[in-house]
Image: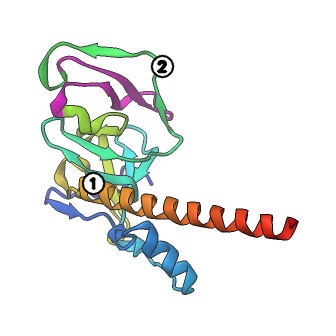
């Protein structure tokens, strides 16, 4: 899409996580598969994150888990292969990133910086470690429903309560681990009975 056909709106947009909250927990997903239900995400409510310089696709709203207003960054769990992680580890001694080490994220299309991945941080940034932080002022959002492109700085990326989801996921994984151990015990019992 060329810059001449793209329309930028100066109004504010709210992007929810594309109804991806429908995929609530592992057990619900497993139940849906078992019951032959189909979990549908309305992709029309999604947006695509693009490099502002060259329009390379960097991610989408399905991978977004919130934003950090103090860093003016979009927090992403995943990005496309066109986001390259610089091998050089850098350190900041000033500003919001003081006493943090990070790697810069570059766009594969124009090789410009588009964000960073924090590694070692003070406690107030610890939740952002190893997540992709894309700079809002370097990103455009292509809105699938309207077919328009807006500056990411004009978009409000609603924060998902990750802590609650992580606790639920941990509980689900622990329950599944118990089920696996029970199944292992049953298999051992069956194997010993079959051998006897």
Q: In this rendering, would 99 be left or right of 175?
A: left
Camera-side residue of 68 and 152: 68
> Which residue appears at 45% of the width and 54% of the height?
1
Q: Which residue is denoted by mark 2 in the rendering?
A: 87
Q: Is residue 57 above or below residue 103?
A: below
Q: Is residue 61 above or below residue 123?
A: below
Q: Earlier in the sequence, mark 2 or mark 1?
A: 2
Can residue 5 be seen in the rendering of this structure? no
Judge whether residue 100 is colored magenta. yes
Residue 130 image offset from top left, x and y in percent = 37, 34
In the rendered structure, are the residues bearing label 2 and label 1 in contact, judged by CB atoms less than 8 Å apart? no
Camera-side residue of 41 and 171: 171
Residue 188 image offset from top left, x and y in percent = 72, 62
Residue 159 image offset from top left, x and y in percent = 21, 55
State which quarter of the image contains the C terminus.
Answer: bottom right
> Which residue appears at 20% of the width and 58% of the height?
158
Q: Which residue is denoted by mark 1 in the rendering?
A: 162
Camera-side residue of 149 and 71: 71
Residue 4 image offset from top left, x and y in percent = 36, 52
Which residues are the magenta region? Answer: 98-124
> Which residue appears at 39% of the width and 47% of the height?
77
Judge whether residue 132 is colored magenta. no
Q: Is residue 87 above or below residue 36?
A: above
């Amino acid at each position: 899409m060329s810059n001449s056909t793209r329309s930028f709106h100066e109004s504010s947009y709210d992007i929810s996580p594309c109804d991806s909250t429908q995929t609530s927990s592992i057990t619900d997903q497993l139940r849906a598969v078992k019951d032959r239900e189909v979990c549908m995400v309305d992709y029309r409510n999604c947006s695509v994150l693009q490099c502002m310089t060259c329009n390379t696709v960097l991610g989408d709203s399905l991978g977004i888990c919130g934003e950090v207003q103090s860093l003016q960054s979009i927090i992403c769990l995943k990005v496309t292969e066109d986001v390259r992680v610089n091998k050089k580890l850098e350190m900041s001694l000033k500003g919001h990133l003081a006493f943090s080490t990070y790697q810069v994220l570059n766009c594969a299309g124009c090789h410009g910086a588009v964000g960073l991945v924090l590694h070692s941080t003070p406690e107030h940034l610890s939740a952002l470690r190893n997540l992709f932080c894309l700079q809002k002022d370097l990103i455009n959002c292509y809105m699938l429903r309207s077919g328009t492109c807006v500056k990411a700085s004009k978009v409000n990326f609603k924060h998902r309560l990750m802590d609650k989801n992580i606790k639920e996921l941990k509980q689900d994984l622990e329950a599944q681990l118990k089920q696996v151990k029970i199944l292992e015990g049953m298999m051992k019992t069956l194997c010993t009975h079959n051998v006897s």
